[in-house]
Amino acid sequence: MAESTIQTLTDVSAYMTEAARAARAASRAVAAAPTAVKSRALLATAEALDAARTELLEANARDLAGARERRIDQPLIDRLGIDDGAIDRMIEGLQQVDKLPDPVGEISGLVYRPSGIQVGYMRVPLGVIGIIYESRPNVTVDAASLCLKSGNACILRGGSEAIHSNRVIARCISRGLEAAGLPAGAVHLVDTTDRAAVGALLTLDEYVDVIVPRGGRGLIERITRESTIPVIKHLDGVCHVYVDEGADPDMAVAVAVNSKTEKYAVCNALESLLVHQAEAARLLPALAAKYREAGVELRGCERVRAIVPDATAATEADWYEEYLGPVLAVRVVDGLDEAIAHINQYGSAHTDCIVTGDYGRSRRFLTEVDSASVLVNCSTQFADGFEYGLGAEIGISTDKLHARGPVGLEGLTTRKFVVLGHGEIRHR
């Protein structure tokens, strides 16, 4: 159903129900598809994207112009833009996912029981996954590729600001599915910008198994509140770097600066920097100079402002804030205990890093910081599926069930028990 024919709430509801039915039917074919068939779909999609460069760049220019006209927030505009490099990364992501081991059908943990039967687990797809996201057109490729490789069908509802880009990408995915002989319903881009489509999707638990939201707090809170379908999500990315006593100063500066400035409008960007009191006088002036050069505003505690007088006074709210821009909260702490307590209180359980030369303290940090990704001596901006070797990610989860951290192929599957016997019968 074309967008122009979706005019009423009833139309939207019917459209979404039909899309979900088609996805459920297609999910059975995708779940049974051999690895070679899924590989053909992924590689044919990559070829179609390469051939559609000009069309995609023109569509993205339309989206960017529309976003600026509507005065959409700059972080969303930053995420919306596509260039040739971004298209190259989409293609590379498809190729990487293709090379990953296919988890579907893998049997593990087989053990003999006293009765003679063998009991183990088989990894199987979740079924139909609904992905609701804002701005980033590359999510359309990432989500479709991961869902296909893991044997799932998916319904993709991108933001209205990216509709033209997403339509071009969806056509490339359709060509990939057609080349592999897979049903078109395996990947469905919701072709309406009506917000009622989201509400309709969230109630289709008869057909849809999981919802994955990617976007701002408002979007994710709405989905969590309204969905009758299980949700894999994270609300905020309040990420920390803690510089420990005795840390290598060059490493500390490099990690802290890159964690913040490599890209601002991402959920793994540094938002709060903690510095051990023994290192504050030595490191804070150098860090402040680097941040000043990058145009980052510092908001510091009293001990920070005594060393960096031009830092703005931090408020209690700053320790909870996900800025997604050139603002950084900075605090001097007495030691590792205070750093861990601060992170567990104010953080969002997303990504946190320690810079240290002490093995024992790094182990304590890894063990006691309750976050989805905990890093030692490297930038928080490594916390994504591509860098973790997942090929791509469908999102990042700060929940503890069913997946946590960047969600790749394994996070899009579940397992069922398999039992192998030789004619055994049970006697009670």
Image (tube, rainbow, N blue to C red):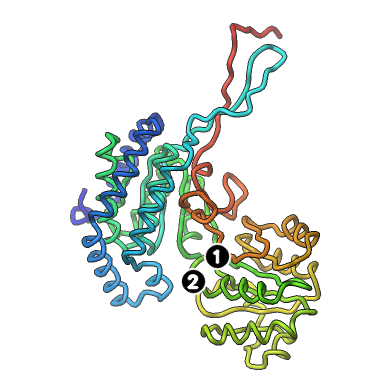
Percent x, y of residue 231: 51, 49
Relative side of 26 to 284, left or right: left
Identify the disc placed on residue 327: none
**Residue at disc 1, secondary structure:** helix
Q: Disc 2 and disc 1: Cα gap in Å? A: 8 Å
Above or below for 234 versus 187: below
**Mark 2 highlights which residue?**
263
Identity, as a three-letter code, of the amino acid under mark 1: Gln
Q: Is residue 417 left or right of residue 140?
A: right
**Tag 2 secondary structure:** loop
Name the N-terminal-most of marks 2 and 1.
2
Q: Residues within 10 Å of mark 2 (few under 14, many from 20)?
A: some
- The quarter of the rendered structure image containing the C terminus is top right
Is 147 situated above or below 424? below
Q: Position of residue 65 (x, y in %)?
A: 27, 74
Residue 312 visible in rendering: yes
Residue at 75%, 85% in the rendered image: 281
| Marks 2 and 1 in Cβ contact (< 8 Å) | yes
- Which residue is painted at 80% across and 67% down in the image? 337
Q: Amino acid at mark 2?
A: Lys
Return the residue nearer the eye: 240 or 397. Answer: 240
**Residue marked by disc 1:** 381
**Quarter of the figure with residue 14:** top left
From the viewer's perspective, is residue 32 above or below residue 385?
A: above
